[in-house]
Amino acid sequence: MKFYLAPMEGITTYIYRNALHHHYGGFDCYYTPFMSNTVLSSKELRDISPENNKDMKVVPQILTNRAETFIAIAEKLHTCGYEEVNFNLGCPSGTVAAKKRGAGFLSVPDELDHFLEEIFAKCPLDISIKTRIGIESEYEWEDLLVIYKKYPIKELIIHPRYQKEFYKGTPHVEAFKQTADILKDSSIALCYNGDITSAKRFCDLIKKVPSTEAVMLGRGVLANPELGRILRNKESELLLSDKLSRFKAFHDEILTGYMDYMSGDQPVLFKMKELWSYMGPYVHASDSLLKKIRKAKRISDYQSTVQIILLEAQRI
């Protein structure tokens, strides 16, 4: 079984990936947030720099509906030493989908087919695809699979929801199961993505689809950074003292990482506050203290509140 960290825009940066890898581990591969322009920003260049991604496998992701853009970015990644790139057909954002990008590209299958034909003919890297199963209908997936089967896709990462469902409701695991059956003799590797937030949900997936060989984890890891380690090693959660000391080291590495290259308190606090919107329950942070985190305007005030959260967690 392989475990991958999902790409989450603005969150799973190289700073977060490194801290997670150093203090928790459990992942075979880490996917970067998407790039969509031929001229990469300084932030994107920093994120994909091999110097910032040592000792772990990283796969950059591209979001576009223009083949020439995809190829141009892929060629830059090739010069950086990457061997694989991931194509984003999974982002359900309304603004993205309206431009026929991300999951929105699935609404024009003929155009998608032509796009895939061109990038597979010209891309210097292996290509994996992260996809939804359509826009709003179960009948769409069958037609999309016909297209995907035409190309030498290294791996198909399936989030079995429709674009219109965003992250609501229950994933259509049956669609993933049927796909595994259809592609069992194919060279295309399959990975499941969607709502694996606990060991129980992981076990439920394996019971339904025993042939599952890879799982991509996203929001579940933000809420519990141990999740990859737990699922890989079939271990229980860390004891409280170990849990808090490891979390503090993890948190401090992320904070220091952002402080090292961001100018001023506010950009750093923006990053850390976003993380706390997920990981508060992991250390039993009270609503009042999480509110203080959200209202912090100086890093010193923020750090004091984090210290109180960890002290209170020790008393539980």
Image (cartoon, rainbow, N blue to C red):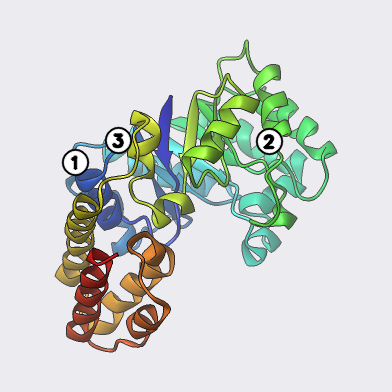
Helix, strand or loop for disc 2: helix
The residue under the point 56% across, 34% down is 192
Foreground: 76 or 316? Answer: 316
The residue under the point 25% across, 37% down is 56
Q: Type of residue at label 3? A: Lys
Q: Mark 1 points at which residue?
A: 54
Label 2 Cα neighbours within 10 Å, binned few <14 / some 14-19 / many ≥20: some
Q: Mark 2 points at which residue?
A: 173
Q: Is residue 65 left or right of residue 30?
A: right
Label 1 Cα neighbours within 10 Å, binned few <14 / some 14-19 / many ≥20: few
Q: Earlier in the sequence, mark 2 or mark 1?
A: 1
Q: Which residue lies furthest to the top in this view?
A: 185
Q: Type of residue at label 2? A: Val
Helix, strand or loop for disc 1: loop
Task: Give coordinates of residue 138: x percent, y percent.
Answer: 82, 40
The residue under the point 37% across, 55% down is 12
Residue 57 circle label: 3
Q: Is residue 293 visible?
A: yes
The residue under the point 23% across, 49% down is 18
Q: In which quarter of the image is the C terminus?
A: bottom left
